[in-house]
Amino acid sequence: MSAAHPSGRSVLRDSVEGQRGRVALGTLFASGHQIGEALVPALVGVVIDRAVTPSDSGALVLWLVVLAAVYAGLALSFRIGAWSGELAAVRAEHDLRVTLVRRVLSPGGGTEEGRLPGALANIATEDAKRVGAVNLALTLGFSALVGIATCAVVLLRTSVTLGLVVLVGTPVLLWLGHLLSKPLESRSEAEQDRAAHASAIAADLVTGLRILKGIGGEPAAIERYRATSRDSLRATLRAARAQAFQSGTVLALTGCLIAAVALVGGRLAAQGSISLGQLVSAVGLALFLVGPLEVLAWVNAELAQGRASAARIADVLATAPAVTAGGSPLPQPVRGALRLDALSHGGLRGVNLDVAPGELVGVVTTDPAHAADLLRCLDRRSDPDAGSVALDGVSLRDLDPAEIRTAILVAEHDADLFEGTIRGNVTAAAPGSGAPEPAMTAAGVTQVSESLPDGEHTAVSERGRSLSGGQRQRVALARALATDRPVLVVHEPTTAVDTVTEARIASGIREIRKGRTTLLVTTSPALLSVTDRVLLVHDGRAMDTAPHADLVRRHAIYRSAVLA
């Protein structure tokens, strides 16, 4: 984009400038098509005056050959012009979609705040498509103006009066069409907003379908989506009415202009000022005007919708990042020393913790929300409200979020799987030379794959829904272990597995992560028992740090959180 905080206008401008060559080529050939279309009625008039009226067979054959050549040229020009315009539209749509996805996936984040994933998907598809279509609209719009200009020139050569009717009437018609597109623009923006919200709600419901069925919440969910869908329908109908009114009014005004040309031409022919062939040409040109004027009405509607969609895209691109890149380089090599110094964020209050390189530390929070606050700071999706998190003595604030994630991996409890295979999911972010087998063994994925028909090559559906909850957790854990990051933070990786499997996974994690820093944010006694020590966080404050067995003896709060 051309600016750090793009506007809808700059999004449109950059979209067109990026496809300038294709738009220019498409306009050139589409204009050739329009010129050819305008010349056809003129040539028909010439055939009548020079071949039909005097009954000249030779002239008739000659002018019919000329007419056929014009038809062949306009047909070829149309194909090339339409192809170039469509290509410009889809390329611009693709470039916009890539730009949007790059911003959404930016390490600094921020775009997801206040927006459901379905809304972002709608902007990256429907809105990008509408903005890209502006390139095709400009291609056809410019060629339509060339066609109208050609028509005016031919009519001026026939009669100054006829030419002036077109030259004066067309700008008035265009101006009225522009005025009529204003309501369409605002209603189109509302339509896209409602449609995006409806898509987001639908995606949200599909994601939580199993939970809804489990708690019997289908009626409430259906009613919620029905209300959202009705809002979207009303907005769509308002936009459709605005478009119908704009198109219908412009078409009626176009008919008035055509009728004026035909009326003036008929009077001139009756007075003997123009010949029969010229009258036929004038009427034919008046009918030809329907095409380019309808195109211009369509262009007005496309521009109105494109402006509305461009504003929505600009709103996403201009979203301030949640965190910004610092100026310090990532320590090399990364030893893995972590320090939480008076960390306060969300519900956390002044938490201190020193983790030595290679240490395996457990973290127990009596409030799950405090665990989420800690993970956000360690992953640098948010900066602390006060205090700091440091890696090898360098504050995470001073590092680029993208570089931090090459050293620290935070594996969330609800991490989704990708569509593909079990092995493909495990190796999704693994180093190129690394073998995933140790990670799969440590996380218990080997046992999972042995029970499946195609083993580790078993297909996994979207978000891993074809696997059980425990199988999904083990594959997600194996994926995190396979990345082999210097620092790994794992959040509740075994809530859906049985006790025996959990104990094996705990031993596997300790073995595979030997010599590298690991934080287990969990209340699982099996996992906590293999840690070097555990930090207990209660009411947002660090209450004690000691081995798991010692904390069990010392604190009833700890026993309640871990053993209950």
Image: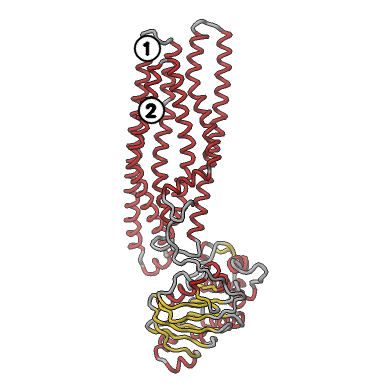
Tell me the quarter of the picture where residue 173 sits: top left
Q: Secondary structure at mark 2?
A: helix
In the image, residue 476 sits, relative to residue 267, either above or below, namely below
User: Front-most of 392 and 231?
Assistant: 392
Q: Is residue 387 visible?
A: yes
Residue 233, position in %: x, y? Answer: 34, 49
Q: Secondary structure at mark 1?
A: helix
Residue 323, position in %: x, y? Answer: 46, 67
Q: CA distance from mark 1 to mark 2?
A: 21 Å
Residue 468, position in %: x, y? Answer: 51, 70
Residue 142 relative to residue 75: left or right: left
Seen at 39% across and 66% down, the residue is 212
Seen at 49% across and 7% down, the residue is 53
Sequence-earlier tag: 1 or 2: 2
Q: Is residue 368 visible?
A: no
Toward the right, the furthest residue is 433
Q: Residue under circle 2?
A: 170
Toward the front, the furthest residue is 327
The amino acid type of the residue labelled 1 equals Leu
Residue 268's disc is 1
Colour pattern: secondary structure
Number of marks in the image? 2
Label 1 crowd (10 A; few <14 / some 14-19 / many >=20): some
Residue 184 relative to residue 22: left or right: left
Q: Say if mark 1 contacts mark 2, CB within 8 Å.
A: no
